[in-house]
Image: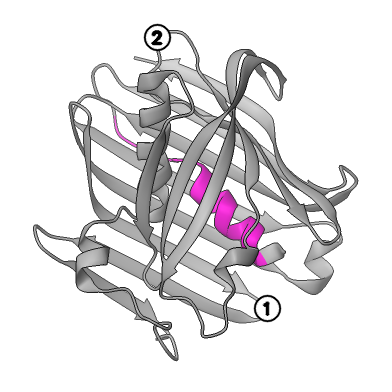
Amino acid sequence: MLRSLKTLALSLAALGFMGAAANAETYRLNYEAAVLGVVVLGTANYEVTANPSRYAVRANLRTSGLARLFDQTEITATSTGSVSGNAISWSRYDISHAYSRKFRRIQLDRAANSVAAQVTPHYGDMGQPPATQAQQNASYDPLTGVFALGRQIGAARACQGRVQVFDGRQHYRLSVAPISQGAFNGGGYNGPALNCRFRYEPISGFSRGFDANAVPTASAWFAIPEGAQFAPPLRLTVPTPLGQAQLDLRGYQRAER
């Protein structure tokens, strides 16, 4: 359960940091994860900045409360790339993952026709089957993947969009489908929003015996602020054997310059 929450939490948001740029739009988002609305699992802080030519993303996730007794995890990740109209092209992704007295760092660099990965320490295996070079080339990194998905939702102002993602080992698809549209009031955001079915679909690079059919479909809320190009995630609800787990907005800031 914790592993799926961490994956979805990192995949849910586009976070970033950039220097001064004309016509830049910045979102600063803070979340709390809990089961049944009572047992706190952790917190996440996200920031995304984009202008007409560049974007950058930064994320931090850490376990807290009862979850920290069983799985002490802290994740920091960044991603940068370029924007050209509706096209988004990532160039570098860097994630550091400290968990259960272990540590792994993954750096992905994307050139014109290839993705170069540095993974320390190396994975024991790359999954069954491993992600192909063609799959890697056709994918976004995890942070850019949801930034791109959020841009698709924002452009359509509807639960429409899908992206492919490669994280250094696993290759998967994120997609949304409509549930309803209405208002969302919480965590500092009060305005129009979309409630979407959010699907995480494993494709390759997963361990032998991993049951892709057991991955639950989540419910996600995305803000659609007036005039915005990006639809930021507000809430993610996932069914688990222990009950509903929820990643909920606790702080929202939007700025333009």
Res 60 seen here? no
Judged by depth in the image, the label closer to the viewer, 2 or 1, is 2
In this image, 97 relative to 180: left or right? left
Q: Secondary structure at mark 1?
A: loop
Residue 153's image quarter?
Answer: top left
Amino acid of disc 2: Gly
- Asked whether disc 2 touches disc 1, contact meaning CB atoms under 8 Å apart, the reply is no
Amino acid of disc 1: Ser
Residue at 29 percent across and 36 percent down: it is 55
Mark 1 surroundings within 10 Å by alpha-carbon count, few (fewer than 14), some (14 through 19), many (20 or more): few
User: Residue 28 in magenta?
Assistant: no
Q: Which mark is residue 227?
A: 2
Residue at 42 percent across and 89 percent down: it is 125
The stretch in magenta equals: 3-19
The residue singled out by tag 1 in the image is 100
Residue 17 x, y percent position in the rendering: 38, 39
